[in-house]
Image: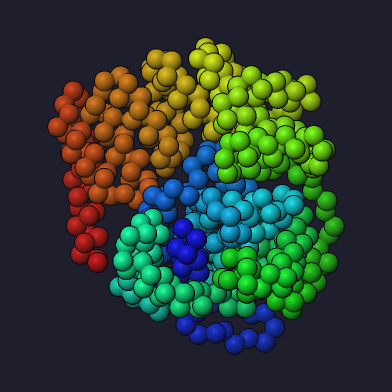
Amino acid sequence: MRIYLWLIAGLLWPLAMVRADGLPDLGEMERSGLSVSAEKRLGERIMLEIRRDPAYLQDPEIVGYIGQLGQRLAGHIDGARQPFEFFIVRDPMLNAFALPGGYIGVHSALILAARSESELVGVLAHEISHVTQSHLARMFGKQSEMQLASILSMAVAILAARSNPDVAIGAAISGQAVGVQQQLNYSRDFEREADRFGLDLMEKAGYDTRGMGSFFERLLQFGRLYENNAPGYLRTHPLTTERITDMENRIAQKPYRQVPDSDEFGLVRAKIKAYDGTPGDAVADFSAQLKSGKYARETDARFGYAHALLRDNKIAAAEAELATLRRLKLESPLLETLAAQLRLKRQDVAGALQILRGAAQHYPHVRALTYALIETKVGAGETAEALAMTQKELQLTPGDARLHELQAKTYAMMGKHLQQHRAQAEAYLVEGQLDPAIEQLELARKAGGGDFYEQSQVDARLHELKQRKMEEMRRR
């Protein structure tokens, strides 16, 4: 995954350096060549491959937290709103990257490296600004879609070679990747503009702008100390003393604002650590922290310890940590899902449902709780209630693939196979998997069991998707 992400992190190289005196407002320049729809299609095709990789993190709590930070920033973008999707890759290489179509990826190591929430937000704001200022579109705007597809194919081949060491072409392709990697960097003007717009975005969203400066300053120092093992972020985002100075000057002109970290910042980082390495190593690591007192917050260390114990199947010890966290007055939706998981480990489905129902009422907008409640209802045989929840939530967020999958699972438990395959088709479609979506609709047609209206809906949707596939084939 690491070489693959280096390859697509910059996604092609600047064809011409922008000459400028001072800092030009590159955002006012015309989008060069690549249309919005073409950029979106390219991003979807890349994401299709990323989602297939085992390193793609699907934990709804961790992903939801990063998405919440990102969407808070995106809500303060002036002008036309670009839709964004934030995702996480479990990788020890410190990196983050923007992809065409508004996809923003963050490595788990970068989340752990951030010393404050504002530092993490600073990286997200910088990557968002690369998208809003059309840097990606201008970097490869003069490339034809055929050339873009060719480079994407090479990226996919590298991924396949990584997953299968026996692939003979792997070494040759990796050699090409190194050559491309040397050119995968944003121009300095693009970087400085992303800094400027990112700082403004942080300020509007209510974060401490010093977080961006402190994080990039630490990156620069790390790159100097370990030149041969510099963070991956520096490979695609050239960082210089001049750029740091410019950033610090801009920060100095902004009002001082001290912003405390949210509870979720520390809890999410602890959960990431709890699922790194082996379960035994994670348990030992958190146990040592608690014995030595070397932690930023006791609640974070105990929360990570509880998850590590749960992962190591030491349920009684994990329950003891949960009780301690309750006594420490920690209140978070992440604590409630942990409590429900422990109840389920005890085969206490009724207890888990009680916890999740109460938590969902207290935190009505936390999607991870919604997923957990639906899944637990299905496991408890409360399929009618689970189905009603998925239908209600999908009216609000029809582009949620996980909700479609949960709906498909619910229909399967109810023995409604036409509806099951139709829901699964929509889940695939949200993720850009057109062929599997068509296959599911074909299965829905053969399954029977639906009334005339439902059969007609399946036929109409199938016809629509087949037409879409024909259009894509013509375009290619």
Instruction: Locate residue 304, reporting x and y percent.
Output: 67, 35
- Residue 228 vertical placement versus 340 (above, below): below
Q: Nearer the viewer, residue 69 or 326?
A: 326
Q: Nearer the viewer, residue 465 or 127?
A: 127
- Residue 464 vertical placement versus 241 (above, below): above
Query: Can residue 169 be spotted in the picture?
Result: yes
Instruction: Locate residue 374, reporting x and y percent.
Output: 46, 24
Instruction: Locate residue 381, reporting x and y percent.
Output: 39, 15
- Residue 304 vertical placement versus 412 (above, below): below
Q: Quadrant of residue 336?
A: top right
Residue drawn 49% across the image and 30% down it? 371
Q: Quadrant of residue 260?
A: top right
Residue drawn 85% across the image and 57% down it? 256
Quadrant where the C terminus is found in the figure: bottom left
Residue drawn 50% across the image and 24% down it? 373
Residue drawn 66% across the image and 50% down it? 112
**Colour scheme employed for the rendering of this structure:** rainbow
- Residue 109 vertical placement versus 368 (above, below): below
Instruction: Locate residue 193, reporting x and y percent.
Output: 64, 72
Residue 329 as seen in the image, left or right of residue 420: right
Residue 167 as seen in the image, left or right of residue 201: left
Q: Nearer the viewer, residue 2 or 35?
A: 2
